[in-house]
Amino acid sequence: MKPTKKQLAMFKVIIENYEKNTKTAKSHNWKKMDDNALWLSLVGQVNVVGGVDGNKRFQDNETLKQRISLNSLGKIKSDEKLATTINAVLREAGIRYASENISKCNKTNALVHNYKFISKYKGGFRNLIQDLVNIKGKNAELERVDFLINNFKYLKNKSARDFLMGLGINKNTLALDIRIQNIFEHIGLQLPNQTELGKKSIYAATEKDIIENICIPLNIQPVVFDRILFHNYDKIYYK
């Protein structure tokens, strides 16, 4: 992907118009969060697949959040009850793809798996995040992404990055979703479709292209560029 001077100029205008009023997570924002807040953030990444409205209802409802808090789930002794409890909360919040048939509900079963992984992790969720932060080197950010994808269900290329970016950990990755695809198409640049971006190699190559050909020339940090496009999508795309 090689944007023209005109296309780069269009992105520059977008950045100039929206950067000042776009919020990004402060560096190491996760340090202000306890284990349960981190868990609910992870739940949110599963919830938003297919649509964000259900997750907003969930995050705004203290009763629903309390029902699947780490403390509440920790009192449940069977996997069946864990699944029943989580599924009921997802369905009450109107989460997309939360099937009534629990055995076929991928989101429910993913969250059961994710909860069990966290509950067994030495030192808890905050220690898991600290271990990710401790990963150093040129490929540290992608190694963190790989850890999440390999150990948590329903976290993929986009959502694993989004989670780390939201915690103020990763700064040089992009959460490529349909909104960003649409904006690029609006400007005249075609990104791979969502199925293609599901492949690790294609996602990484696309991310690298955007960073090298847009973010670096325009002197914009990838996480900031990502948040500008995401949070101002309606203003940019429908303008």
Image (spheres, rainbow, N blue to C red):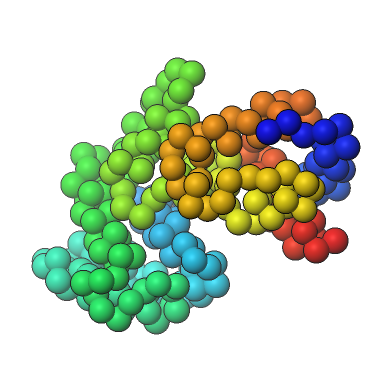
Which of 215/18 is in front?
A: 215
Q: Residue at x 40, y 72 (%)?
A: 97
Q: Position of residue 25 (x, y in %)?
A: 60, 44
- Residue 42 can be seen, yes or no: yes
Quadrant location, the C terminus: bottom right
58 with respect to 127 (left or right)? right
Residue 158 lies left or right of residue 12; in this view the side is left
Work out which quarter of the rendered image holds the N terminus and state it: top right
Q: Residue at x 69, y 55 (%)?
A: 182
Name the one closer to the observer, 30 or 219.
Answer: 219
Name the foreground residue: 191 vs 213: 191
Name the spot of residue 96 as percent of width and height, x first.
44, 73
Q: Residue at x 79, y 48 (%)?
A: 187
At x 58% / y 36%, what residue is drawn?
A: 206
- Residue 158, given in percent of the width and then of the height, sits at 49, 47
Is residue 85 visible from the viewing direction of this image?
no
Query: Residue placed farthest to the top in the image?
Result: 137
Task: Report the residue that reaches farthest toward the left.
Answer: 78
Up the image or down, 189 lies above or below 100; here it is: above
Tally the marks: 0
Q: Residue 85 at what x, y percent from top left?
A: 25, 74
